[in-house]
Image: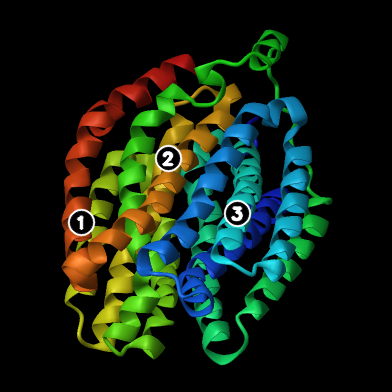
Amino acid sequence: MTNTKLWTKDFLIISTENFFAYFTYYILVATITVFAIDKFHASPSEAGLASGIFIIGTLLGRLFAGRSIELVGRKKMLLIGFIFFLITTLLYFVANSLLLLIIIRILHGAAFGVTSTATGTIVADIIPHERRGEGIGYYALSTTIAAAIGPFLGMYITQHTSFSINFVVCFIVLSVSFLTAVFLKVPKAEIPSKELDNLKKFKWDHFFESKAIPIAIVTAVIAFCFSSVLSFLTSYSKEIYLTDIASFFFITYAAAILVSRPFIGRWFDRKGENFVIYPTFLFFGIGLLILGLVHHGFFLLLAGVFVGIGYGNFLSSGQAVAIKVSPKHRMGLATSTFFIFTDGGVGIGPFILGFLIPVIHYRGLYILMGFVVFSCAFIYYFLHGRIAGRVDRLNEEES
């Protein structure tokens, strides 16, 4: 009889590990632009580069981890990732120039890429197949909660204490993560010896899972749009005199996902991905339009609700699709492929959008991003949505 139990000790541990990794990412990505501007007098585009360059390192880390995780071992890769994470976090304390900060951000990003690819691969194997949409949805809540607490705490620390306290907090939570990971039991991957030998060669399909690329492309565009919120909300809130309220934006963002996620995960498994993904484009796009037109704190928080329901649920559903369409023994590559494209969108966004801000300003930026999100419904249809039912039938025949 197939074990369908979801809430196991290992599921809770790996979700906690993922939370700590993403907490470190979010607490810094939401505040590092302010740090770069205040300490090194960086321009908006330079500050955006300091924020977004982290993702370049993440891409390199994911490329390494996606290809090597089955050769090194999933748990060992996770432990290596956290050790690297701890070391690179300490380097922030010696950053004395914008160039050095950018180099440290690349290294820190690589550590994050290795760690988060390991957590995503491990959890995909822990979750029962028939509860994958629901399980990935609950697992992704760890990212959601990190996306709420990280920026909120980062903004609070930046406003009320020394910015370096952010680095101290990151080092502490990563130390706890490493110790917790020791107690994790990871299922042994059943990979044919021929496939393992094949992985030692350098080929395109050793770095990317081709079946996951269509949904990953859509996610890259969506993540590009979300980067406008993640990197520039703090500066935007200063401009419109809503700084205090803005610190609660990610709280309402997370609350909206927490309330909606249980339904979304079950609908994904029972009704299919199209049933849940198309509405996420509508909610996310509306949230960005509200953000671009906001003049009152209430509507800023309302935008957080719409962005949470839209972006938050699209991301977990997209990850479930990437794993669903890929062979089981390539789940590590499917996970890394999905997040390479996601991180690419988040990473390149702040740098490119930083050049648009002086021209169309923050309000125009969010309105523009809202319409880009609406267009993603058409991109999704042509890349995956129109064949989603056929993919389900093929998976049923194979099993």
The amino acid on which the numbered mark 1 sits, given as a three-letter code, is: Leu
Rendering quarter of residue 120: top right
Q: Is mark 2 on a helix, strand or loop?
A: helix
The amino acid sitting under disc 2 is: Phe
Q: In which quarter of the image is the N terminus?
A: top right
Looking at the rendered image, the disc whose residue lies closer to the viewer, 2 or 1, is 2
Left or right: 141 as drawn, with respect to 196: left
The residue located at (37%, 59%) in the rendering is 350
On the image, numbered disc 3 is attached to which residue?
103
Residue 27 seen in the current view: yes
Distance Cα–Cα, label 3 vs label 1: 38 Å
Where residue 256 appears, as percent x and y from the top left, is 38, 69
Residue of label 1: 282
Amino acid type, callout 3: Ile
Q: Is residue 102 left or right of residue 82?
A: left
Q: Where is residue 39 in the image (x, y as percent from the top left)?
A: 54, 77
Q: Up-down: is 125 above or below 229?
A: above
Tell me: residue 234, above or below residue 282: below
